[in-house]
Structure formats: C-alpha cells, structure tokens
Amino acid sequence: MNNLTFAMVKPDAVASGKLGKVLDATLAAGFIMLGGKLTRLTKVQAQAFYAVHKERPFYGELVDFMTSGKTFVMALERENAVQAWRDTIGATDPAEAAEGTIRKLYAEDKGRNAVHGSDSDENAQKEIAFFFSDVELISNQD
Ligand code: IDP
Ligand code: MG
C-alpha cells in the first residue's frame, strides 16, 4: 500500500494551539484523513514507537518530550503518501526545512519539531497499526 502514511501532531504544536493550522495544511496538501484522534502517549508507548532510536543520545529527551502533552495521531491517504507527507512537513530540523513546509512554519527546533511522518510504506503500516484498529479507519472505497 503506497497510498497511506502515519502522521502525528506532536506535543509542542498541540500545546501552542497549532493543531488547527497543521490540520488545515494537511488537508490543503490533498491528504484525506482515514483516522484521527487526540491522545497522550504513555512512556511505554513513546519508548516503543521510537525504539529504532534507542541508542541515540537524544532518545531520553525525545521520550520525555513525546509524553509531555497531547498529540494528534492520523492515518492519511494520498497518492505516494509517505513521500508526499515528508515533502509537506519538511526536514527534521526546521532551520533546514523548505519554505512553506509545516516544520518551517510551526516547529520550534530539531527535537520539538511539530509533526511526525513515516519514513517508508512498511513503517507507515506498522505505525498506523500501533495507534488504530482496523474498524477505526474509514475506507474511502465505499
Ligand atoms: P524524522 O522525524 O524527520 O523522521 P528522525 O531522525 O527519525 O527524524 O528522528 C525522530 C525524532 O527524534 C525527530 O522528529 C525529533 O523529534 C527527534 N530528534 C531527531 N534528531 C534529534 C536531535 O539531534 N536532538 C533532539 N531530538 C532529535
Ligand atoms: Mg523518522
């Protein structure tokens, strides 16, 4: 499935009132939301979600940040969704993100960077399944 990706609006953006602006930008970029919910990650969830980074020096900081407040998680549909969403959010560090991208517009720094995006179709599928059951995802095929 190359038409799905997983996205998160991270605690910095939700806490500073940017959720609506990020959702506007998401829909304006042509993504269709198949599932979405507000949640607060537990420490166990954040550690598991970012397990691939557990040897990195910023892992503890990342887990603390991701559990610091509410996040909005989404399953998004669009053609070539993974790459299209990464293009829409921009580089990890907002200082390096292209003009007009969500991170350039709304992120604070490389750690508190407003949004998450899957990096492959395989991870998109895993990440969607991490937060959503099948019945929570609305099909657009009907
Ligand atoms: P990505 O979110 O653009 O895919 P990754 O390298 O997968 O970037 O890193 C995952 C998350 O870890 C980033 O979005 C950011 O929140 C955090 N992070 C990455 N590098 C750093 C860093 O050097 N310092 C602090 N946090 C970082
Ligand atoms: Mg990543």
Image: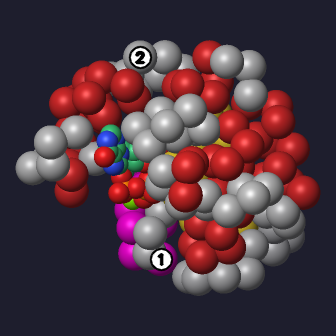
| Residue under numbered circle 1 | 121
88 displayed left or right of 107: right
How would you rate the neighbour count of disc 2 (Cα within 10 Å): few for under 14, some for 14-19, many for 20 or more? Answer: some
Q: Is residue 45 above or below residue 56?
A: above
- Residue sitting at 68 percent across and 62 percent down? 98
Residue 100: x and y in percent read 79, 56
Can you say which quadrant of the picture contains the C terminus? bottom right
Residue 126: x and y in percent read 39, 62
The mark found on residue 65 in the picture is: none
The mark found on residue 68 in the picture is: 2
Q: Is residue 41 above or below residue 141?
A: above
**Residue closer to the observer: 3 or 134:** 3
Q: Amino acid at mark 1?
A: Asp
Residue 3 image-quadrant placement: bottom right
58 displayed left or right of 24: left
Q: Main secondary structure of the magenta part?
A: helix
The quadrant of the rendered image in which ligand 2 is seen is bottom left
**Is residue 44 covered in magenta?**
no
Q: Amino acid at mark 2?
A: Ser
Residue 14 image-quadrant placement: top right
- Residue sitting at 62 percent across and 17 percent down? 15
The magenta region covers: 121-130
